């Protein structure tokens, strides 16, 4: 029974995912040699034959025939009289091979062998899995969602290896169910308690880069290079691209006809807005492109402090800053400079304008709302209109308008 159990153990190993046949054979032979070494003090004169596919094992003990008077080592020698009992034709100097049965080693030795064999093979599989994925860091992989926990998702690759996708590496709007196909990039591989931990990511810039390589043949072929990617997963991303062939428009190639190429990427990233920007070594032009869709009037760069002052018309400021400051934050990361945004003021104005909300302690809120309703959201925009125009357009009392004008004028005196 122990013999059968042992054979079952190593015949199962032919199904292992991360160990090649040659390595497996070497480990199995090595373990059996250790057993022979213990029993016979040497394994040199033994042949071990293993058939992994059939789960067969044969061990043959080879001994040289010597004269009965010269017989001293039962491990390497056999006396002529004993040899002739096996076969009459044997002569001195010939080799006699006898099969060694597993049961000859004893039950305890076989149990120990089985445990040792299982431990060695599993350790080898872990090491090979670690080495395999260590080389694949930064590569995109496709797996299947196997189990969903609060803080992470367990993913199985096409060979059944276990991979982890932590909540922190998922796009905020990601939603998966068991059995769903999932794409992610291998973020890191580490050993914990002698077990390889393979961590995936869908928020890393490398994931977006690999998706572009899959969708845009020119990037995969090296005709277009991605210089840098910055992203806020699920919200917005900025990708700087450059072409080494003047005949290829890198932005157009990445977007595709009617957005066909980029649409697939956007869907995979849960409708993340992607700005593809033409890279340039001209810093002023690069900053201007990075702040798209805002239109910049001029830029002052401080190379020592790695800061840039960006000047825009008032109506462009909100575009440059973006929702929650997202656009300017990503643009800063892309160009590597801290960007400060300033509104342009007319040359005749020597005093900065003030938003009318700043006067809420002197002017009632409903009055301020009436002014904003006609597009007057700053003090100077109100002062540019006459008293009669304000009365007519806001439906405010003439006395109220006079009071407003007096308060606003006093701000600039």
Image: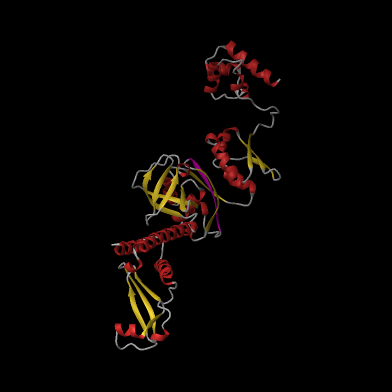
Query: Horizontally, is 370 left or right of 259 in the view?
Result: right
- In the image, residue 102 sits, relative to residue 389, either above or below, namely below
Question: Split into 4 quadrants, where in the image is the C terminus?
Answer: top right
- In the image, residue 319 sits, relative to residue 262, either above or below, namely above
Query: Horizontally, is 201 left or right of 98 in the view?
Result: right
Camera sees residue 189: no
Question: Which residue appears farthest toward the front when viewing the image?
Answer: 69
- Name the residue rendered at 32%, 70% in the picture: 101
Q: How far across and down, in percent of the image, does residue 88 sit?
A: 29, 87
Judge whether residue 237 is colored magenta: yes
Q: Nearer the viewer, residue 38 or 34?
A: 38
Judge whether residue 381 is colored magenta: no
Q: Main secondary structure of the magenta part?
A: strand
Q: How far across and down, in percent of the image, does residue 247 sit?
A: 53, 59
Q: Nearer the viewer, residue 263 or 89?
A: 89
Q: How many marks?
A: 0
Q: Quadrant of residue 405?
A: top right
- In the image, residue 75 sits, relative to residue 156, either above or below, namely below
**Range drawn in magenta:** 235-243
């Amino acid at each position: 029974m122990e013999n059968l159990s042992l054979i079952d153990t190593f015949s199962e190993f032919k199904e292992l995912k991360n160990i090649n046949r040659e390595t497996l054979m070497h480990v199995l032979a090595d373990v059996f040699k250790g057993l022979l070494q213990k029993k016979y003090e040497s394994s040199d004169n033994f042949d071990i034959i293993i058939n992994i596919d059939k789960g067969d094992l044969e061990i043959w003990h080879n001994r040289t025939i010597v004269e009965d008077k010269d017989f001293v080592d039962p491990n390497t020698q056999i006396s002529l009289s004993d040899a002739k009992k096996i076969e009459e034709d044997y002569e001195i100097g010939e080799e006699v091979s006898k099969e060694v049965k597993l049961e000859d080693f004893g039950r305890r030795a076989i149990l120990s062998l089985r445990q040792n064999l299982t431990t060695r093979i599993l350790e080898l599989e872990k090491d090979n899995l670690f080495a395999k994925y260590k080389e694949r860091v930064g590569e995109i992989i496709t797996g299947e969602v196997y189990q969903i926990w609060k803080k992470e998702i367990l993913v199985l690759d096409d060979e059944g290896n276990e991979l982890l996708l932590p909540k922190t590496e998922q796009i905020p709007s990601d939603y998966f169910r068991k059995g769903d196909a999932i794409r992610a990039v291998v973020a890191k591989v580490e050993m914990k308690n002698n077990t390889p931990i393979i961590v995936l990511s869908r928020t890393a810039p490398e994931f977006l880069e690999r998706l572009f390589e899959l969708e845009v043949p020119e990037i995969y072929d090296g005709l277009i290079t991605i210089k840098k990617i910055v992203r806020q997963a699920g919200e917005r991303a900025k990708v700087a691209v450059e072409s080494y062939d003047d005949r290829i428009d890198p932005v157009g190639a990445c977007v595709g006809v009617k957005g066909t190429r980029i649409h697939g990427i956007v869907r995979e990233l849960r409708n993340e807005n992607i700005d593809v920007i033409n890279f340039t070594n001209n810093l002023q032009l690069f900053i201007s492109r990075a702040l798209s869709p805002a239109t910049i009037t001029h830029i002052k760069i401080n190379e020592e402090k790695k800061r840039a002052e960006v000047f825009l018309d008032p109506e462009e400021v909100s575009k440059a800053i973006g929702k929650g400051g997202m656009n300017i934050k990503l643009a800063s990361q892309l160009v590597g400079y801290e960007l400060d945004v300033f509104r342009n003021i007319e040359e005749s104005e020597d005093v900065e304008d003030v938003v009318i909300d700043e006067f809420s302690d002197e002017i009632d809120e409903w009055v301020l709302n009436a002014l904003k309703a006609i597009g007057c959201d700053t003090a100077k925009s109100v002062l540019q209109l006459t008293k009669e125009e304000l009365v007519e357009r806001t439906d405010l009392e003439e006395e109220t308008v006079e009071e407003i004008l007096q308060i606003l004028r006093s701000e600039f005196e």
